[in-house]
Image (cartoon, grey):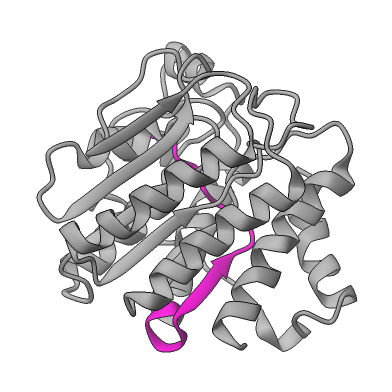
Amino acid sequence: MMKYELIPEQLIYEGLVSRDSFFEPELVDKEIIYLAHDKQYTDDLLNLRLDPKMIRRIGFPMTQSLVDRERYLIDGSIKASLEAIKTGVSFNTAGGTHHAGRDFGEGFCLLNDQAVAAAYLYHSGLAKKILIIDLDVHQGNGTAHIFEGHPDIITFSIHGEKNFPFKKEKSHIDIPLADGVKDEEYLSLLNETLPRLFQENEPDFVYFQSGVDVLATDKLGKFKLTMAGCQKRDELVFQNCKNFNVPVEVSMGGGYSYHIKDIVNAHVNTYRTAIDIYDL
């Protein structure tokens, strides 16, 4: 999508970051992918031998460049996680491929960058309790599928009850909302829920899927959040992470507004909010 090229350039244009603020990912090793994804599914994907039914479920024709892109996304989220441990917060300028489950791809997601990164931190002993906060308008069904019942990697999703995916998986905490929800109701609910999540689960690392398809301008979202409401959502997440002294990695997730400037500006606001809160 065009937004993944425009977000870094807009960040630099606005003076929020400099070019040396960025790092480049590498192709993640398949042994790391196995930490979150089924070995057979992973090998079939990497060798371009998925069956036609799975390819239709994903929605993309399989190409080597597309598969490589997913491997870069995962390494980007792992590197961002390691940076966040040092600085408090770090971003993947893409990612958020939360519809990919343990043994399936779906909804244009082949592999799940934050799930693999979370599994990597956990298996490496770099985090003992992880909270994944998914605020994309669509449920993070793949992430929920991968970590269902996991005692130490907790999945939390606020999403549209009647939106894609139509078959939901079971997150540790799901809050489905009706179409048309506006700023006040959404933000009140989030403000009530986040502190309790931190207090009850005591995470030592957080992943934030920061999709901006919650905007009223979004073609697919069905929520009615304003640009200011979306930015306040981000503020609540970052402020809770900082208050509880928990590092956070952020992946972009969805955004499908009619005008590309609305998508890019909303994503840039997520960075701007983090920079303000963390005094970066």
Examine the rendering and report whether any part of residue 276 can be seen. yes
Is 132 located above or below residue 161 in the figure? below
User: Any magenta on residue 99?
Assistant: yes
Q: Which residue does the image show at 23% across and 50% down from the upper left?
A: 154
- Indicate the quadrant containing the C terminus: top left, top right, bottom left or bottom right: bottom right
- x, y percent for residue 18: 77, 85
Is 191 located above or below residue 159 in the figure? below
Is 61 located above or below residue 167 in the figure? below
Q: Is residue 257 left or right of residue 159?
A: right
- Indicate the quadrant containing the N terminus: top left, top right, bottom left or bottom right: top right
Examine the rendering and report whether any part of residue 99 can be seen. no
Q: Which residue does the image show at 22% across and 39% down from the upper left?
A: 172
Question: Could you tell me how many numbered marks the image carries?
Answer: 0
- x, y percent for residue 167: 37, 14
Is 84 located above or below residue 2 in the figure? below
- x, y percent for residue 158: 43, 36
Q: Is residue 273 left or right of residue 242?
A: right
- x, y percent for residue 269: 72, 62
Name the image quarter holding residue 17.
bottom right
Q: Which residue does the image show at 22% across and 42% down from the upper left?
A: 147
Name the image quarter holding residue 40.
top left
Q: Which residue is at the front of the view, 180 or 210?
A: 180
User: Any magenta on residue 203?
Assistant: no
Q: Give the range drawn in magenta.
A: 84-100
